[in-house]
Image: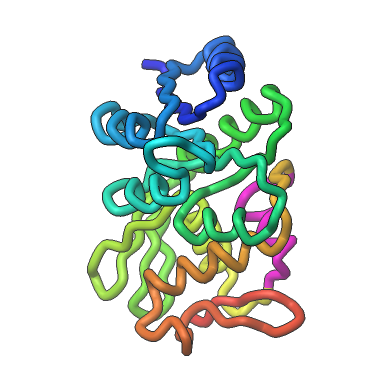
Amino acid sequence: MNETILVIEDEVKIARLVRDYLENAGYRVLVATRGDEGLALARTERPDLIVLDLMLPGLDGLELCRRVRQSSQVPIIMVTARAEEADKLIGLELGADDYITKPFSPRELVARVRAVLRRVRGGEAPPELLRAGDLALDVAAHAVTLSGQPVQLTPTEFALLETLMRSPGRVFSRLQLLEQALGEAYEGYERTVDAHIKNLRQKIEPDPKNPRYIITVYGVGYRLDA
């Protein structure tokens, strides 16, 4: 069965253009032009990925992202006309996996969709379990537990944590994390890593303000302490 993409975009011409390009790429596409309609489709259709505009009638994109994340880790790509870094970071902190700024090339969006879905699917690697203290990451099952309790991570958070756990004690720069965890073709700016790390700490650290696992190396980047 073809993977399903939910496009939530209030500009009808853009929504149709994105739908056409995604369908030509082999995806099943659902379209909503209002935030409340998009949220309903996200809950009933369970898409494989959501393309989400931030400026929406009915329910704005940031609030929609927040509500989706309450019950689902479906990958989300934000679409925004806003150029300010703060808006992008807010969306990433709410759990979005990537973003693209208008005006954008439909081909670029399709490439982003493919890249995010590739990260979700992962490779054909043999079963592997990574451990650091009470933290365990099962690569094959795409699952994380803390003291035996499951931890729900977005695909991007999982990829970043896996990269850090594969090399405990190694200091990664933000750029290295972007390239190794998200792929060299990832075109996000380096500071997006900070937003994802903040989310990770909220989920895996006993005290996020005094992290036990993911340590900031000021002026350099991050490392994982085993």
Can residue 7 be seen here? The reply is: yes
Residue plotted at (47% across, 86% down): 209
Q: Is residue 44 left or right of residue 61?
A: left
Counting from the top left corner in percent of width and height, residue 147 is at 26, 75
Residue 173: within the magenta? yes
Here the colouring is rainbow
User: Could you say which is closer to the camera, residue 18 or residue 117?
Assistant: 18
Q: From this view, report whether residue 176 is shown above or below residue 210.
A: above
Magenta range: 172-184
Q: Is residue 160 left or right of residue 149?
A: right
Q: From this view, report whether residue 9 is shown above or below residue 205.
A: above
User: Could you say which is closer to the camera, residue 63 or residue 204?
Assistant: 63
Counting from the top left corner in percent of width and height, residue 169 is at 60, 80
Q: Residue furthest bottom?
A: 210
Q: From this view, report whether residue 173 is shown above or below residue 110.
A: below
Counting from the top left corner in percent of width and height, residue 99 is at 61, 44
Counting from the top left corner in percent of width and height, residue 219 is at 76, 81
Residue 17: within the magenta? no
What is the quadrant of residue 153 in the picture? bottom left
What is the quadrant of residue 113 in the picture? top right
Can residue 140 be seen here? The reply is: no
The dominant secondary structure in magenta is helix
User: Could you say which is closer to the camera, residue 63 or residue 106?
Assistant: 63
Residue plotted at (64% across, 30% down): 109
Q: How many numbered marks, from 0 up? A: 0
Q: Quadrant of the N terminus?
A: top left
Residue plotted at (73% across, 45% down): 187
Residue plotted at (52% across, 54% down): 91
What is the quadrant of residue 114 in the picture? top right
Q: From this view, report whether residue 6 is shown above or below residue 207.
A: above
